[in-house]
Image: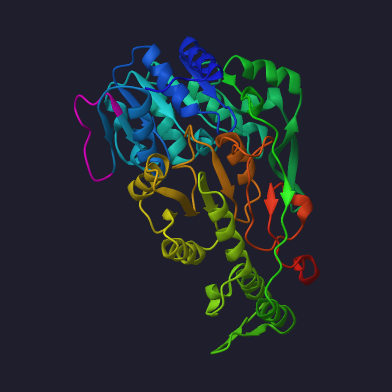
Amino acid sequence: MPTLSPYQVEGAEWLASKRRAILADRVGLGKTAQAISACDRLGCRRVLVVAPKTLLHNWAREIGLWSEGDVHILTTRNDLKPGARWTVTNYEVVVRRPLFNTRWDALVVDEAHRIKNRKAQRTRAIFRLARRVPVVFLLTGTPLLNRPDELWPLLHAVDPETFRSYWRWVDRHCLQETVVAGGRPVATRVVGVIDEEALRRELSAYMLMRDGSVIDLPPRLEEVLRVELSPRQRRQYEQMRQLYVADLGDEVLVAQNALTRLLRLQQLALDPRLVGGSVRGAKTDAILEFIEDHPDEKILVFSTFKGFVRLLGEELQARGIGSVAITGDHTPPQRQAAADRFQTDEAVRVLLVSGNIELFVGRDPKTHAVWWASRRHLLPARLRRRLRPITHHKEGFIAVVDALHAKPRTLTYPIQVDGLDTLGAIG
């Protein structure tokens, strides 16, 4: 069984001492392991875990890694398993099944920001469960998404007596303004916090929130890597940019509108084969060269395009390089199986991903290089907190972007492969 990091031990002990609390550590700090450990410390014999459907198998795996006891995944198609110490289910089941009739020692709610709407069915179902369970742990990396009153459902779930009234809490902590329609006031809305320090003091008794500074990671190395498109690829790209069409040889690619043109430009800049071309893209060549130049490292490749994952997988297979893939087409068990193979099979050097990364990014002790190929600008920070730096870069890990991006100022990618720096001119 692995060992918790010191800050995770501190978090588990804090949860156990509170018994009903909110763990709001930033993404990647191991809230799952801390909650499991806290349940063990309290001797909980029957634990209900509520999580998004895509994370059920990940929770089952983590429980097997950090604790002991039978784990049962409860869905709408099966029943509770008598004697199972851990029951893992999703929000839909909590709404549809009377789980509050079962005696639970602990309730763990993952991605608890999903109960921010106090009137939603899932929120009311969690409230009903939480009132009947002595130990309640809410886990979320984003306790506050839009407005400060979204904190009230979390606080009410862990302490319904103190936080009985939503409006009383809002009047005490939230700035409000009147909504006028037809010349008459029709409602009020929350626009801010009255006293941030007072709110912080109140939250400190119920919520533990820490950022990535608790992990001893080296600073991130950021580097822009420019890849020149081949003459043919550049010509196709410019045709699409200027004329909304591109000559692919055997056929002509046509974009019906500006939004489609933007998508086709991204695909052409990455690899023209994504849209029916016959020539491999320059960025694909660069990625393959990088992988071949780092034979001793595990490498992750993220792409916005599922088709690129397939193309790159075929290229790697032709070169005798072992890889596995995770896309939106795979079920949660298939995703977790691919992630496990990547982490445990020495012959599998590359993990190709297009989709949700929550299932596999974990505490692999090996060093990883990262090729980044998605347009989502938040994920590099998530990866930075979850992956260890590669060995031959003293300052951090490597990541690469696959397609065009609107404004470099909005991005913090460690390595950015832009192809042609033209997207700003076409917007």
Q: Residue furthest left?
A: 82
Where in the figure is residue 263, as x and y percent of width and height? 62, 70
The residue under the point 43% across, 53% down is 326
* Number of numbered labels in the structure image: 0
Where in the figure is residue 146, as x and y percent of width and height? 66, 40
**Going by the image, does 364 lie left or right of 132?**
right
**Location of residue 133 by image quarter:** top left
**Going by the image, does 237 lie left or right of 131?**
right
Is residue 105 something that shows in the picture?
yes
The residue under the point 78% across, 65% down is 424
Is residue 160 something that shows in the picture?
no
* Magenta-colored span: 76-86
Examine the rendered structure and indicate whether residue 273 appears above or below residue 394: below
Give the overall secondary structure of the magenta segment. Answer: loop
| Closer to us: 77 or 310 | 310
Examine the rendered structure and indicate whether residue 21 appears above or below residue 363: above
The residue under the point 49% across, 40% down is 361
